[in-house]
Image (cartoon, helix red, strand yellow):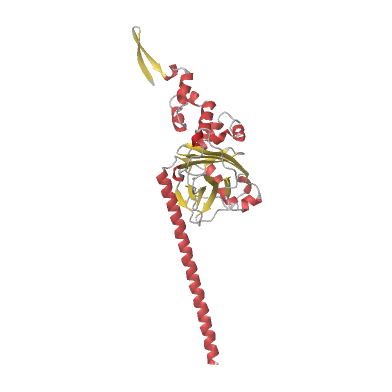
């Protein structure tokens, strides 16, 4: 990374080390996380500058506005590399799981608390930013279906984003243009993961209420998926409900303990580059297809059992009838 410049009677080489650090920091602030990490691999000088905590702190807060929450600010200020570690955990997608935690595993290894940093956008403009702290150590949570609510229709509507002009404080929201970032954080182990993809995998209309149901999902294997369901109003499209759930291949929500096991395994697992929205949608459709095939197979087995029971009952009735007639 050097250039040649004419000096009085000769040439001198100018390298990246000759650029003032303040100029480099100003330039690095315009990079996203992936580009910033790549720049740090170029030279030892760039690595030292690109590793400054302020760069990664500003990048994380810009990427996830919900990180301005006081508890998350304290949590991520605990070590100089906290923001960089958080970005490396939360920005890439978790890799698919091959083996899930068994029921015999120690419950103490599961997270006792989860913090959800939720940021919802419409056409790139922030719509909702919220932090949800969930106590996952109780028997009630671990025995009930896994569900974390970021917004309930009984809650007051979220305040308009300060980035929007006053005239657009109540804009019409097109559900298809929503994007989501739901980061799940284990505050005690200081690990994090993005729960779902950023783009919807399905947009449907409720046949009774007329409300639009937007689904974000991340398929974590053959048997399970994490999903966020966002319910939007019929007339304005305003967000009414938003919940994170863990679903099994049979279409039933996993128990709280099983959902924690899935999240714990995904947090500790590898990361991969975020998939294109077409790929994520195709994987979700394949997951739903496997679910439908399993339901059809179960229905065929139930019909076979019913027919067998009818046959046995009919044979028993005919046998008793024959005995009664013969007497």
Residue beneath the point at 33% across and 7% down: 9
Quarter location, residue 156: top right
> Taking the image as drawn, is residue 247 in sight?
yes
Task: Give the percent coordinates (x, y) of residue 311.
Answer: 49, 77
Vertical order, 81 against 3 (above or below): below
Quadrant assignment for the C terminus: bottom right
Vertical order, 64 against 211 (above or below): above
Vertical order, 39 against 258 (above or below): above
Task: Give the percent coordinates (x, y) of residue 169.
Answer: 51, 37
Disc tally is: 0
Residue beneath the point at 43% across and 46% down: 280
Task: Give the percent coordinates (x, y) of residue 282.
Answer: 41, 49
Q: Of 84 and 279, which appears nearest the observer?
A: 279
Q: Of 36 and 64, which appears nearest the observer?
A: 64
Q: Of 298 and 207, which appears nearest the observer?
A: 207
Quadrant assignment for the N terminus: top left
> Taking the image as drawn, is residue 220 in sight?
no
């Amino acid at each position: 990374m050097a250039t040649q410049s004419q000096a009085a009677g000769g040439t001198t080489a100018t390298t990246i080390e000759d650029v003032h650090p303040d100029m480099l920091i100003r330039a690095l602030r315009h990079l996203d996380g992936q580009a910033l990490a790549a720049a740090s691999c170029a030279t030892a000088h760039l690595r030292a500058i690109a590793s400054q905590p302020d760069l990664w702190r500003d990048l994380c807060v810009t990427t996830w506005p919900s990180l301005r929450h006081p508890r998350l600010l304290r949590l991520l200020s605990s070590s100089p590399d906290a923001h960089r570690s958080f970005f490396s955990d939360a920005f890439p997608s978790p890799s698919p799981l091959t083996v899930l935690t068994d029921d015999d595993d120690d419950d103490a290894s599961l997270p006792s608390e989860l913090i959800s940093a939720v940021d919802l956008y419409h056409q790139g403009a922030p719509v909702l930013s919220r932090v949800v702290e969930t106590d996952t150590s109780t028997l009630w949570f671990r025995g009930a279906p896994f569900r974390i609510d970021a917004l309930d229709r009984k809650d007051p509507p979220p305040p308009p984003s300060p980035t929007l002009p006053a005239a657009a404080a109540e804009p019409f929201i097109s559900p298809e243009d929503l994007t989501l970032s739901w980061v799940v954080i284990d505050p005690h182990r200081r690990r994090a993961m993005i729960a779902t993809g950023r783009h919807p995998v399905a947009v449907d209309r409720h046949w009774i209420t007329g409300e639009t149901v937007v689904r974000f999902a991340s398929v974590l294997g053959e048997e399970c998926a994490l999903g966020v369901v966002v319910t939007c109003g019929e007339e304005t499209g305003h967000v009414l409900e938003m919940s994170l759930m863990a679903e099994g291949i049979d279409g039933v929500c996993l128990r709280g303990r099983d959902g924690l096991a899935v999240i714990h395994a995904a947090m500790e697992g590898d990361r991969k580059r975020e998939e294109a929205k077409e790929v994520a949608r195709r994987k979700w459709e394949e997951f739903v297809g496997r679910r439908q095939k399993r339901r059809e197979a179960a229905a065929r087995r139930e019909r076979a059992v019913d027919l067998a029971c009818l046959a046995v009952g009919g044979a028993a009735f005919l046998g008793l009838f024959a005995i009664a007639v013969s007497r």
